[in-house]
Image (spheres, rainbow, N blue to C red):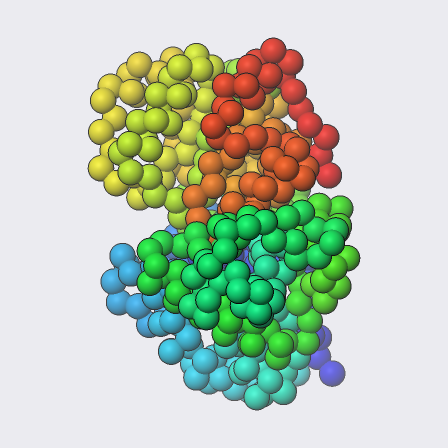
Amino acid sequence: MGKPHALLIPYAAQGHVIPMMELMQRLVNHGVKVTFLNTDFTHKLVTDAFSTDENLNDLASFVSLPDGVEAEEDRKDVCKLAEAIFQLMPSKLEELINKLNINEGEKVTCIVADTCMGWAFEVADKMRIRSAAFWTASAAGLALLWSIPKFLEDGIIDNKGILMKKQMVQLSPTMPAINSENFMWARIGDMKTQETAFHFAIKTNEFVKLADCVICNSAYELETSTFTSFPDILPIGPLLASNRVAKQIGHFWKEDSTCLTWLDQHPIGSVIYVAFGSFTVFDSRQFDELAGGLETTNMPFLWVVRPDMFEDMKNDGFDDRVSERGKIVGWAPQQKVLNHPSVGCFVSHCGWNSVLEGVTSGLPFLCWPYFSDQFINQMYISDVWKTGLEFKKMKVVLFQVKKSRIKLNSY
Ligand code: UDX
């Protein structure tokens, strides 16, 4: 018998590809043969952003399939992308597995797919391949999706997922209460998108039942009560770059490492790091508020401004006014930045990967959640772990950072 062969299938978004790549590296280190399946679009981004003198295929075998979306713009609509993938990919996946299985000793023995690619468990079931569902966000987020039948029964939502009662919900007696306004599907775009996201969640719940196990990029210590109440979710995280100074892979943009030398020039705990992940888009008012706030602090800051991040950014001389103490980059080596001694606090959108990275680096957060699960992640930071505050309390935190250069204990 050949060695085990795992086919890894991330959802086609930055915050999902990165943790799947980390899982890939751990499996390879344990002697598992890995084939990593991206969409054509994300495969190109990952390969282009990877260093030119190395080859991704030295790490594992990379393959890709079309995602069924024509225009680049449409990929920003998560529901549209997920639906297009669902229409096209299942049959293509079967063909791919049949091709991979031609070599007798290298047959695919297991599929690990992102929970958002739930249709892959149906393919695995049909082809009699064992499968694991990988949930890349907090266990509380998944527990919330699994509690949808109870919310319907209690009349908290209607059958379109629309909120009927605003209240704090307790998924189990020991879990922190969650505000029903922060249900993940309720924090995605307009009503129509929310409804689509809700039905996608229900479909996902059904697909996940076909998987042999559910693994989650979180740790028992971080979400003890959730893992205790939902024992079917297995913690395997946090999956972070194994050596924080090592090369980070799976990124969609090339990292600008000049910010590390810039950080070297600043005192310990003095720099505000501002980053909103791969997806957040701000309007000009939000940009002005943030830029104005950073300017007012009089403190050094490193701000990640992706090329596609702002609709209609005015700037208004901001760069010139803050050039002495502010650095703006298009994409940072975030894990290295968060572990740099000069960084004293993290202004974040609270995407789950950023949360794991910031918490394990011992940094206090200023939370500005934007989308989906980020509001629940913020609740963990500000109400449960108490390692940060909501954005509206910014002044207080900055004062603390300046005075005491606080560093919180990391996990
Ligand atoms: C998305 C969702 O928004 C998030 O809520 C969900 O939990 C996962 O999918 P994203 O918005 O991209 O993710 O945020 P996040 O989860 O924080 O992932 C971003 C990743 O990009 C992190 O690993 C972070 O280290 C990396 N990053 C971000 C960089 O390497 N450089 C940067 O400049 C910014």
Q: Is residue 309 above or below residue 215?
A: above
Between 183 and 56, the one nearer to me in the picture: 183
Residue 308's x, y, as percent?
31, 44
In the picture, the quarter occupied by the N terminus is: bottom right
- Going by the image, does 210 lie left or right of 235? left
Q: Is residue 127 above or below residue 268?
A: below
Residue 112 seen in this snapshot: no
Q: Residue at point 60% right, 85% down?
A: 125
In the picture, the quarter occupied by the C terminus is: top right
Residue 324 seen in this snapshot: yes
Between 216 and 111, the one nearer to me in the picture: 216
Residue 123's x, y, as percent?
53, 83
Q: Is residue 122 above or below residue 176?
A: below
The quarter of the picture where residue 289 lies is top left
Between 160 and 47, the one nearer to me in the picture: 160
Q: Residue at point 66% right, 57% down?
A: 171
Residue 175's x, y, as percent?
70, 51
Q: Residue at point 29% right, 38% down?
A: 283
Residue 353's x, y, as percent?
56, 46
Q: Residue at point 44% right, 48% down?
A: 371
The quarter of the picture where residue 112 lies is bottom right
